Image: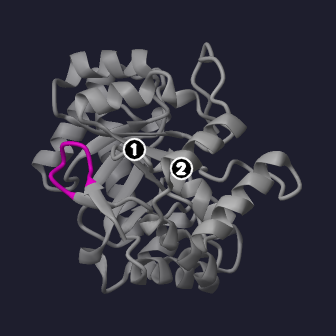
Amino acid sequence: MRQNPFGATGHHVSVIGQGTWYIDHGDRAAAVKALQAGLDAGMSHIDTAEMYGDAEPVVAEAIAGRRDEVFLVSKVLPSNASRKGTVAACERSLRRLNTDRLDCYLLHWRGQVPLAETVAAFEELKSAGKIASWGVSNFDADDLNELLRVAGKGAIACNQVLYHLQERAIEHRVIPWCEQHGVAVVAYSPFGHNDFPSPRSPGGQLMAQIAAAHGASARQVALAFLIRQAAVFTIPKASSAAHAADNAAAGDLVLSEADIGKLDKAFPRGREPSSLPML
């Protein structure tokens, strides 16, 4: 599994990680096995959140005895993002995850609490050794500029944002901003939200052709397109060990410039929207 520098954290992190949104809605044993299979395949980056119901306890079960293998990320809800609230939310997540530290802790999206207050809480948690780094999710370029003024250079580890072949809005300003400022981009919902291109559609047929040429799957092609830039990581969810192994194999798939050009044409990024899409 290819690993790239994760922003300014000093860590190298697997370019394909593991998401856990809705992972608690199915068979728990299968979910645990999928996460463990992902770890076995090198997908050491596991992302979760306090909002994801019982996902954190599922992750805790999956990483038991393997904590040092994992780059573990969780998130605080905006409604909990006051200085005291952030610290308390982090401590609750640590208990649910059965660990003493997070490798990165994110503000899930921007809310009403001033950024300076949340950043102060993040820095307090860093000083206490409860988190190693912090970042944000669903921030557009204007939000990131404001955050940079509050936090200073080198403080923001990552920005986790919606990104898949049919939703490329972050390519306009967010990815360039993050590349310029040494911030990792983490793509969530990399297969879309129940709208992965149909095999019968022109785009789906193109993906199948590219996949066949590489001895890969269409989903691996979709992931490889997203991580073609070194600053970008992605966190697909897997519901089974086989699905996790398929996701992991995308970490070593390198598309040609011709492949990328064809996909770019088939799935145009379109105009920059007035607000950043999110789920």
The kind of residue on which mark 1 rests is Gln
Please give left or right for residue 35 compared with residue 91 in the image: right
The kind of residue on which mark 2 rests is Phe
Q: Quadrant of residue 199?
A: bottom right
Please give left or right for residue 64 compared with residue 191 in the image: left
Please give left or right for residue 199 compared with residue 89 in the image: right
Residue drawn at the location 27% of the way across and 27% of the way down: 180
Q: Which residues are magenta?
A: 5-11
The image shows residue 221 at horizontal and vertical percentages of: 60, 59
Q: Which mark is residue 229?
A: 1
User: In what element is the residue under mark 2?
Assistant: helix
The image shows residue 152 at horizontal and vertical percentages of: 16, 23
Pick out the residue farthest to the left.
127
Q: Which mark is residue 225?
A: 2
The image shows residue 276 at horizontal and vertical percentages of: 57, 24
Q: How many marks?
A: 2
